[in-house]
């Protein structure tokens, strides 16, 4: 029987079933242990130092105790601390992105995904390079600067060469004042050599959802295809980092397995990356199973209600305070509004989950991966965020200035990242307002920018940001960054 070892490179040792079960038992035994819970909360709370705030984070066992805790006043404190951490390290900035689906050809048999090979009535599509170009122009015309490209796993239809060609095409398109400045990649687990090629192509974050950490469930949910190999899939992030990719993004599909098991596994995976590579995940995504073609989420009996979903987000934020957190348009406006307060730092806007969907006037449904709950335009999402006191950020400066991996985390942990992120967010928001926004959004945005400029503590940075913002307003100069 495998022994738990966070420094091991073997999936069954760093995501160890025995350790997870022992963790869940420990959490259940201590969910009303007020003294222990108070100690855990004290550890999680940001501590002020001369250089700013620091956070210790939590172990998977500590975080699991908080998740199990149902003492109302303690749960409220979890939410308060999550909000403190969010504001301490990410401020009121929210990074904007959109997914771009390249192909839904897939050879896997995943039971929760409409792309599964046995689904014979979904429309199969694969974008040509000209179609990629048109999709990107449509996204640029909305104002997007950051994309996450997605493709099914099919070595014939979607080989690594096709993905690399698409990345080259995307980065090569300059349309009016638009340009995609960061391409994140969400494709199937692959080899160290292929990860090296993705790194050389200039990708931002490599994203791969585990779907479920419960091996027995994983094997049942992935009955056929290369994704059936649990170990190869679970060990993918180690190969990606060996291939030179600094920033990796984790995630589970909540609703496939019991959420407490998934939560513990997710935090253990983050601990493993920190233990082996010296840096944890750049982002964590928290999707839930949603309705899609040939998929009924009610088939999965592990779905979680909105209040528990919010608690999961808050507890992740306490456990991994420096990691970005992503919520997609799978979730409704109401759910996303609460999640933003509790720790989310990135949201998608105006997403279409179908191949070729952005060039269609009406939202197509014949090749969607899942139903989109938040169907507002990017302008509507940007305006909503600003009305709620957030700064929509289209910034990609850290990636392009080499502030990735451990360099990003060291800046984040000392609070120094705030010296560049805040002004960069304001400058990229100005670009959006000038080039793409509606009149109402523009008016709201410029008022917010004036208000936020005054909060930049460094006088020289504040003056430079103000000068750059004026340049963006009155000329075609773009892409200023600290």
Image: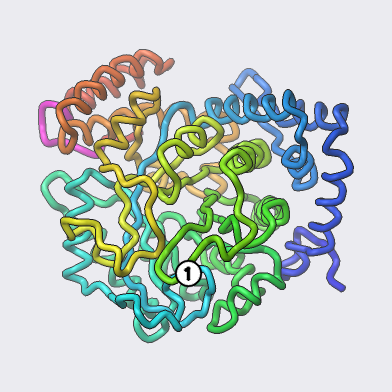
Looking at the rendered structure, the secondary structure element under dot 1 is loop
Q: How is the image coloured?
A: rainbow
Q: Which residues are magenta?
A: 472-479
* Residue 94 falls left or right of residue 102: right
Percent position (x, y) of residue 102? 31, 68
Q: Nearer the viewer, residue 279 or 440?
A: 440
Residue where numbered disc 1 is placed: 113
Q: Is residue 477 magenta?
A: yes
Q: Is residue 32 visible?
A: yes
* Residue 214 falls left or right of residue 450: right
User: What's the magenta bit mostly, secondary-structure-wise?
Assistant: loop
Q: Nearer the viewer, residue 137 or 103?
A: 103
Tell me if mark 1 has few (under 14), some (14-19) or many (20+) residues whose alpha carbon lies within 10 angstroms of its own: many
Residue drawn where x is 84% and y is 63% of the image: 18
Residue drawn where x is 47% and y is 28% of the image: 418
Residue drawn where x is 53% and y is 26% of the image: 87
Q: How many marks?
A: 1
Against 13, is 27 above or below?
above
Image quadrant in which the N terminus is located: bottom right
Percent position (x, y) of residue 52? 59, 22
């Amino acid at each position: 029987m495998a022994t738990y070892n966070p420094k091991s490179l073997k999936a069954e040792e760093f995501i160890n079933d025995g350790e997870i079960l022992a963790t869940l038992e420990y959490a259940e035994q201590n969910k009303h242990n007020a003294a222990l819970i108070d100690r855990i909360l004290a550890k999680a709370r940001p501590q002020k130092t001369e250089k700013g705030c620091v956070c210790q984070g939590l172990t998977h066992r500590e975080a699991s105790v908080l998740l199990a805790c149902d003492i109302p006043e303690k749960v409220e404190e979890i939410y308060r601390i999550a909000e403190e951490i969010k504001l301490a390290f990410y401020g009121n900035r929210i990074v904007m992105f959109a997914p771009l689906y390249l192909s839904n050809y897939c050879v896997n048999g995943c039971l929760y995904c409409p792309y599964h090979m046995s689904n014979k009535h979904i429309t199969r599509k694969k974008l040509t390079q000209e179609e990629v170009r048109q999709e990107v122009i449509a996204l640029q015309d909305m104002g997007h600067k950051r994309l996450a490209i997605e493709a099914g796993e099919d070595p014939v239809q979607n080989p690594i060469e096709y993905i690399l060609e698409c990345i080259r095409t995307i980065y090569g398109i300059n349309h009016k004042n638009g340009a995609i400045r960061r391409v994140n990649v969400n494709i199937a687990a692959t080899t160290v050599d292929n990860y090296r090629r993705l790194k050389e192509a200039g990708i931002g974050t490599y994203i791969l959802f585990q779907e479920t950490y419960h091996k027995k469930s994983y094997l049942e949910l992935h009955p056929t295809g290369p994704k059936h190999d649990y170990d190869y899939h679970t060990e993918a992030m180690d190969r990606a980092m060996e291939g030179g990719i600094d920033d990796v993004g984790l995630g589970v599909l909540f609703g496939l397995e019991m959420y407490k098991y998934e939560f513990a596994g997710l935090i253990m995976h983050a601990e493993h990356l920190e233990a082996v590579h010296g840096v944890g995940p750049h982002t964590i995504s928290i999707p839930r199973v949603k309705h899609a073609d040939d998929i009924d989420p009610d088939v999965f009996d592990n779905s979680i209600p909105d209040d528990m979903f919010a608690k999961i987000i808050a507890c992740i934020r306490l456990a991994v305070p420096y990691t970005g957190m992503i919520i997609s348009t799978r979730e409704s406006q109401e759910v996303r509004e609460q999640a933003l307060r509790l720790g989310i730092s990135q949201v998608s806007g105006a997403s279409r989950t179908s191949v070729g969907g952005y060039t269609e006037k009406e939202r197509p449904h014949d090749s969607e991966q899942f139903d989109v709950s938040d169907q507002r335009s990017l302008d509507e999402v940007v305006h909503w965020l600003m009305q709620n006191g957030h700064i929509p950020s289209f910034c990609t400066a850290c990636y392009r200035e080499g502030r990735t991996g451990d360099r990003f985390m060291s800046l984040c942990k000392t609070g120094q990242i705030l010296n560049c992120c805040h002004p960069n967010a304001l400058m990229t928001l100005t670009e959006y307002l000038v080039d793409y926004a509606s009149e109402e959004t523009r008016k709201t945005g410029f008022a917010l920018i004036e208000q936020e400029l005054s909060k930049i503590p460094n006088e020289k940075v504040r003056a430079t940001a103000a000068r750059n913002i004026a340049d963006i307003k009155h000329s075609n100069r773009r892409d200023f960054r600290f």
